[in-house]
Amino acid sequence: MVEKASLGTLLSFFNPCAKEVLPTSHNTLARYTDPPLCRYLDKSDTLGLVGSFVQISDDEKPQRVRVLLGLQEVAGHSGENQGRVIAPILEEFDIMGKIGCVMGDNSGTNDTLCRFLSSRFESLETTTTPKWVAQEMRGRCLGHMINLIVNAFLSNKEICEETEEEDLWVTITTTSYEEAHHQEKEKGKKAGRKKQTSSKLEPIAALTKLHGIAVHIRNSSGHAKEFRRLAGRLIPQDNATRWNSWFTMVKVACEKEAAVLKYTLNNRSDLREKFLTDEDWKELRKIRDFLKVFHEATLRSEGDHGSIGHTLVLLNALHECVTDEIGETESHGMQQRLKKCQSTIHNWWKRCTRESPLYILSVMLQPQYRTELFSAWGGVYGEETVAQARERATAFWQQYKQASGTDSIQPPAPPAPPSQKKKKKTNSTKMSALTSKLHALTIAPPRPRDELTDYLLSNLNSDIQKLGLQGYSNSSLIEWWYKQRHQWPTLSRFAIEILSIAAMSDDVERVFSGCRRTISWERARLGVDKVEAVECLGSWFPLNAEDEVGGLGDDSEDFSIDSDSEDDKE
């Protein structure tokens, strides 16, 4: 409204001096507004829930489907408040007993949410699915992990969190929901009184200067127009919560280096201390090349391409990349940052495998990997860590198999002995009869083989070669496992349920981006219920998903639900 010329004309009619003080950009108006007033006028928090499941089409081809199940107001960001919104949605669709992994960001409130859902799940008294343990079924968004790893490299302080993470893990695994919720509150009070142990690092001068230039460009419409005239576009500004925002800012700045230099010279009075030297540009290009790997890892895990099976593999690849960079870097300050980044990756890899068996199982259930990577991982993260993760994965599979009520596969019968020529009839003695009986006892019948063990020991070279030609995409892996349902019936279903779990909660992030377009200035008074209806219809209609969601209770067609939950402000 403030940018419309008609408003300026109207106010100037009443007061000719208004043009001198009237802001022409709503960014300027936002700076004039009192921050507490902004918070008061802000709308309530909104929570989105996206369900992901595998649907078998008429041509016997499995397809991963993601639909928006709900978009509702929530009283606050606490896990208990979120659970009270999510549980009725799941019960309305009659899928509370079918939920699999809950994928969300790394906020502690999502741990509380999972414990809340676990308490509701136990009240169902279902015996067709294994016990839903909050610790095991809580997924961590890979995009958020990568963002935290990059921030560890870019930030100027290192906070020691090992003790706190260990305490949180013990709390989740050893206490009930009510006790853990109480302990979480008490721990938050104590943490507020403690000083964080940190070791300061000097900020990266080149990034600090570039950030200042990007802020200066956007602090007035005149500056933005000037830079757009020089470069044809603006430099994206970094954001603490937006994935890869630092990489995007540095990448665009390096592409528009001449325009940045020209703009800095034109505004030398304001940007004298922000002038980027040749050494600064050299450092920015190095940072761009380093952060590009994290950007590619994020893209590889998004949307239909992403699966929880990529998490450990990509984290390990990033760990190797950082390790190589440490060996090639001579700067002591940069080495410190790289080591901090390496340590953060190391901790997240170990935390994922320690908390949930789904991560290590998702690697084992990919034919091209199975257990081939475990020996190399043992050398990096510790043999004991990998061994314990594999034990938890095997135990989780045994629980699933027991809940499914299926037996192990029977091995093929041994071939019949070759026919022998008739021997001359001899008098049978008591000793020969006893000897024959003892010989029969020593030949034990073949024991039934576990499906997972049989899969791990099978020769799958031809299948791996075919999958390699398809690029090991998530859809091709799910399709391959569906074809194995006759050979490994229980394991096939188990693998599809795990590999259909998303690596990120980006689907929910995308929902909120869509809501921003739905709620235009002309629709600013739309209620949350109306926005939910519009977004759900938009999610269901293209896939004809209204009938598919209604059919989630049919065990013969659909596989487990993977829920992505995220809360945000709209």
Image (cartoon, rainbow, N blue to C red):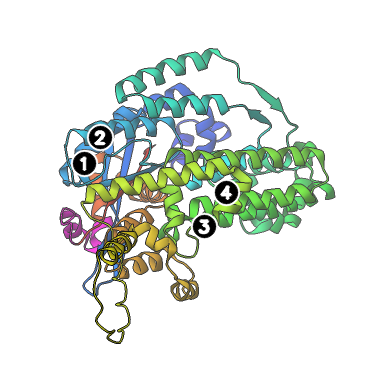
- Give me the disc on residue 85: 2
Label 2 – label 1 distance at C-alpha = 7 Å
Instruction: Give the mark nearer the N terminus: 3 vs 1.
Output: 1
82 shown above or below 303: above
The residue singled out by tag 1 in the image is 89
Q: Judging from the image, what secondary structure is the residue with disc 4 in?
A: loop
Q: Nearer the viewer, residue 165 or 144?
A: 165
**Mark 1 Cα within 10 Å, few/some/many (few <14, many 20+)?**
some
Q: Sequence-wise, which precedes: disc 3 or disc 2?
A: 2
Look at the image and say whether residue 555 sits in the magenta stretch. yes
Q: Which residue is mark 4?
A: 244
The alpha-carbon separation of the residues under discs 3 and 4 comes to: 10 Å
* Mark 2 vs 1: CB contact within 8 A: yes
User: What amino acid does circle 2 point to?
Assistant: Val
The stretch in magenta equals 539-556
Q: Position of residue 547 (x, y in %)?
A: 16, 59
**In the image, residue 419 above or below residue 144:** below
Residue drawn at (45%, 21%) of the image: 36
78 part of magenta stretch: no
